[in-house]
Structures are given as C-alpha cells and as structure tokens.
Image (tube, helix red, strand yellow):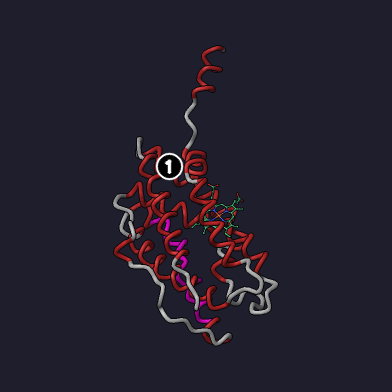
Amino acid sequence: MTDNVTACKVAKPDIATRLRRETRDAHCQIEAVMSDLLFATPLDLQAYQHMLKLHRSYYELVEAKLGQFHTTAAMMRERCKLSWLDSDIRYLKKDCGQSVSDHGSYASEALELPENEAQAWGFLYVFEGATLGGGHILDRLRHQPHFKGRSGLRFFHSYGPKTPAMWREFQLSLQQFVAANPGSEKQIINGANLSFSNMYALMKGVRVD
Ligand code: HEM
C-alpha cells in the first residue's frame, strides 16, 4: 500500500501534461499577439490576409519536413492544412479584393526546423493544438461582415466537429511514439518550443501600412 502511494507521488507526468506545462508561456505569448490581430474591432482585413500568407509559407516548410520522418509522415496523411489556408487566401483575394505585398515577411533561413523525428512530433503538437484554439477564434470571427458561412475562415474551422476526436487520436499516437522511443520527451518539448517561437516571430512580422 505504502509503496503504491509512494509510486503515485513520484509518478512522472505524461508527455501531454509535460507539453502543456512546459510550453504554457509560449502559448500565452502567441495567443496574445494573435488576439491583438484577430479580435481588433473592426478586423483589419489586410492584416488578416497577411497573417494567412505568412502561415502558409511557414506551414509549407514545416509540413514538408514532417513528411520526411516515418511516423509524422503517417500522421500528415490526414492532417495537412495547406489547402485550408489556400482557400481563405483565394476567398479574400477574389471576393474581398484584398491584396498585400510580401513586405514584412520573415526570412525562412532564420527559422529552426525539426532536425529529428522527436522534434518533429513537437512541431506537430503545435499545429494540432492550434486547431483547439481555432474553434474559439472561429466563434469570434464568424459574425464579422466579411465572412459568410465558412468563407475566409476555413483554416480556423480546422477539423470542425471532428476536432476533439482528432486531438485525442493525436495524443494517443504521441504516447505510442514516446513508448517506442524512451527518452524522447526532451526533444519533443524542445521541438514544440522551437515551433512556438518560430510562429511568434512570424506573427510579429505581420505589419500593415
Ligand atoms: C487567439 C489565438 C488563440 C487562442 C484564443 C487559443 C486558445 C486555446 C485554447 C482555449 C486551448 C485549449 C482548448 C481545449 O483544451 O479544449 C488551446 C490549446 C492549444 N493551443 Fe491555442 N489558442 C490560440 C492560438 C494558438 C496558436 C497560434 C497556436 C500554435 C501556433 C496554439 C497552440 C495551442 C496548443 C498546442 C494547444 C494545446 C494545449 C494542450 O496541450 O492542451 N494556439 N488554445
């Protein structure tokens, strides 16, 4: 009995708990900078489009990298988000007549991309976790006059009603990766923090004249 109690007290937190805990500050930072842009009244449509374009460049680089590691490549078969970003960018250009120059974009060579499979899981965690916040963002933006239905908001709609199930499946696969790769937690958390800091730099690059 005593042994069980002791074991419980010293049980190591699982990867999901560690990721949430050890990236909390980074999440707060990105949430603050995104909220400033997305929840400004009225919404600056040009800044919104600029944000989508920067996201697109970044997601393209990272998704290509995730495709290079066996286990993350398998996950990406149904988790690619580029077409969502493309559809929003197209809508803004066509229906809202928005067009922004590429000024203020980031230098891709300054980005740190995953160097190994464990780090890649950390990057994937950030992309998948962002779909959870997406629902909250969608609720705030869907009443804006520029958007009808899902038009212009496909990226934040993400997996829609399937989002909680996709998240659970992601967490399960992540646990399986850790079980098969003991000691990989540090690299996974490091990858997640790298991705958050890339995205923070990216969002800081959203400037509108
Ligand atoms: C205005 C912007 C954002 C808001 C309001 C927001 C809000 C949230 C909320 C409410 C959750 C928890 C959802 C739940 O447990 O059901 C969450 C989780 C998460 N978000 Fe965000 N988010 C924002 C932006 C972002 C961005 C830009 C990223 C990534 C670049 C991100 C990454 C994550 C991650 C990784 C989680 C999972 C945390 C966990 O391990 O449980 N979020 N977000």
Query: Does 169 sit above or below residue 139?
Result: above
Compare residues 117 and 17 and report the one nearer the observer: 17
Ligand 1, by image quadrant, is bottom right
Residue furthest right in the image: 143
Residue 38 on image: x %, y %: 59, 67
Q: Which residue is mark 1?
A: 176
Q: Amino acid at mark 1?
A: Gln
Residue 54 on image: x %, y %: 44, 70
- The reply to whether the magenta stretch includes residue 119 is no
Residue at image point 51% right, 47% down: 25
Residue at image point 56% right, 57% down: 32
Mark 1 is surrounded, within 10 Å at the Cα level, by few (under 14), some (14 to 19) or many (20 or more) other residues, namely few
Residue furthest top in the image: 2
Instruction: Decide whether the magenta segment is chiefly helix, strand or loop.
Output: helix
Residue 101 on image: x %, y %: 43, 81
The residue range painted magenta reads 74-91
Q: Quadrant of the N terminus?
A: top right
